[in-house]
Image (tube, helix red, strand yellow):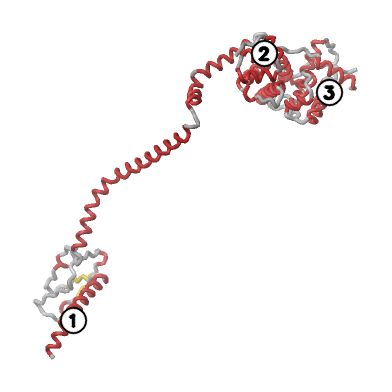
């Protein structure tokens, strides 16, 4: 194929029958535009229109502040509600705890000992050579409040093995400390007595 | 706004009209623009897609977009290139959509050159037989069918250049290509078209 063919081709392309738009094209187009305009003016676009009409940049900071304030109030109220909702059971529980604490404070000498620390020692009374009728108060100022076992409260005066409760080390230490304090308190009077005797 | 009569409108350039339309939203001005461009655009779209109904739909969509997006037009570009760009993009999108459908219908397993048009026009066509004597109408029809077989990237440029007779600069603006690329693609497209029409132009 030569240059002549290309020229022919270009001429033919140029002379191809023109395709025109149909007669009613403009009518159809205007109908579509009218439909679009009617949709725009009502229904679909109403929200946008309201927004555009009433929206002003001046309101932006004001709206933001109000929104933040509302959020803060809402958050705080929500937390308050949560506290109130939990408050009732706590309030119910508090007096019980307080009573227990006050009892412990008012009676410091009464120490409750957990049962796990109860050490049971079996002793043969005969080996003590104390004789019958002697009151063995081996509790050494220690009283177990919780314990209601009769055998621990009062020693039986029988030949049966005696059960002694040994207090825990901290209690012993405390008692020893008290005893030492008491001794210090009476030390001067003891000296005075001794000096008089001399 | 004062109503403009047809004579006044006809004297104005496309750019003046579109700027006036942006300001006034006058339907008369819009109609004048439609009147000026409906036939050239219809011709371009029809040659590109090969279907009258589809071309009409695309043309309507083009002018509808002109109405809706008139404010996007800036004086940087010529109005003609702007409206051609809209039409060409719509046509290409529609062709791509149709080709995708065609792939899953009758042309499922066919292998072909990359970018080659896939459509019902690929079915065997007796009119390409050399023994058929063509008169003017048949020849035009054959050229149109051959044009549809050329890759869209070449076809678009051939139509704009050789049928619509736009300048290379305008074509470059419409397609977003460099002028050199436009020229080389047009040459390749013509060569492909010649190849397809070798039976007609055989001496």
Q: Is residue B118 visible?
A: no
Q: Of discs 2 and 3, which sits in the foreground?
A: 2
* Residue B166 picture location, percent across and down: 78, 21
The reply to whether dot 3 and dot 1 touch (C-beta < 8 Å) is: no
Which residue position holds label 2? B32
The part of the image, by quadrant, that contains residue A184 is: bottom left
Distance from disc 1 to disc 2, alpha carbons, whole Å, reads: 125 Å
Given residues A191 and B49, the one toward you in this image is A191
The reply to whether dot 2 and dot 3 touch (C-beta < 8 Å) is: no
Report crowding for label 1: few under 14, some 14 to 19, many 20 or more residues within 10 A (C-alpha): few
* Residue A70 picture location, percent across and down: 39, 37
**Residue displayed at 12% across by 88% down:** A196
Q: Residue at the far front: name it.
A: B2
* Residue B18 picture location, percent across and down: 66, 19
Distance from disc 2 to disc 3, alpha carbons, whole Å, reads: 41 Å
| Among the two numbered marks 2 and 3 on one chain, the one whose residue lies closer to the N terminus | 2
Quarter occupied by the N terminus of chain A: top right
Q: Residue at the far bottom: name it.
A: A198
Q: Of discs 3 and 1, which sits in the foreground?
A: 1
A109 left or right, relative to B165: left
Which residue position holds label 1? A187
Report crowding for label 2: few under 14, some 14 to 19, many 20 or more residues within 10 A (C-alpha): some
Which residue position holds label 3? B195
């Amino acid at each position: 194929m030569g240059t002549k063919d290309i020229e022919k081709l270009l001429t033919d392309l140029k002379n191809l029958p023109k395709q025109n738009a149909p007669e009613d094209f403009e009518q159809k187009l205007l109908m579509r535009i009218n439909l679009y305009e009617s949709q725009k003016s009502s229904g679909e676009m109403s929200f946008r229109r309201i927004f555009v009409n009433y929206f002003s940049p001046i309101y932006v900071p004001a709206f933001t502040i109000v929104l933040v304030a509302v959020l803060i109030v809402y958050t705080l109220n929500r937390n308050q509600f949560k506290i109130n909702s939990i408050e009732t059971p706590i309030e119910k529980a508090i007096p019980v705890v307080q009573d227990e604490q006050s009892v412990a404070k008012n009676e410091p000498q009464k120490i409750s000992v957990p049962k796990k620390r109860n050490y049971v020692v079996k002793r043969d009374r005969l080996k003590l050579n104390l004789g019958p009728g002697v009151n063995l108060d081996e509790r050494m100022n220690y009283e177990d409040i919780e314990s209601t076992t009769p055998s621990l409260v009062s020693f039986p005066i029988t030949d049966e093995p005696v059960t002694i409760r040994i207090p825990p080390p901290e209690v012993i230490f405390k008692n020893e400390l008290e005893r030492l304090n008491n001794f210090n308190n009476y030390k001067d009077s003891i000296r005075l007595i001794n000096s008089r005797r001399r | 706004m004062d109503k403009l009569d047809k004579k006044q409108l006809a004297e104005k350039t496309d750019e003046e009209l579109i700027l006036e339309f942006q300001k006034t939203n006058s339907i008369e001005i819009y109609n004048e623009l439609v009147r000026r461009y409906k036939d050239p655009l219809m011709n371009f779209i029809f040659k590109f897609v090969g279907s009258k109904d589809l071309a009409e739909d695309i043309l309507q969509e083009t002018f509808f977009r002109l109405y809706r997006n008139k404010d996007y037009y800036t004086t940087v570009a010529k109005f003609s290139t702007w409206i051609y760009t809209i039409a060409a993009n719509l046509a290409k999108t529609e062709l791509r959509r149709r080709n995708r459908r065609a792939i899953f219908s009758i042309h499922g397993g066919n292998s072909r050159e990359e970018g080659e048009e896939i459509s019902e026009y690929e079915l065997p066509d007796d009119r390409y037989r050399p023994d058929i004597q063509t008169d003017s109408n048949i020849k035009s029809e054959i050229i149109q069918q051959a044009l549809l077989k050329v890759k869209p990237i070449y076809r678009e440029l051939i139509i704009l250049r050789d049928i619509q007779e736009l300048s290379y600069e305008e074509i470059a603006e419409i397609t977003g290509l460099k002028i050199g690329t436009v020229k080389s693609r047009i040459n390749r497209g013509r060569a492909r078209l010649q190849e397809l029409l070798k039976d007609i132009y055989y001496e």
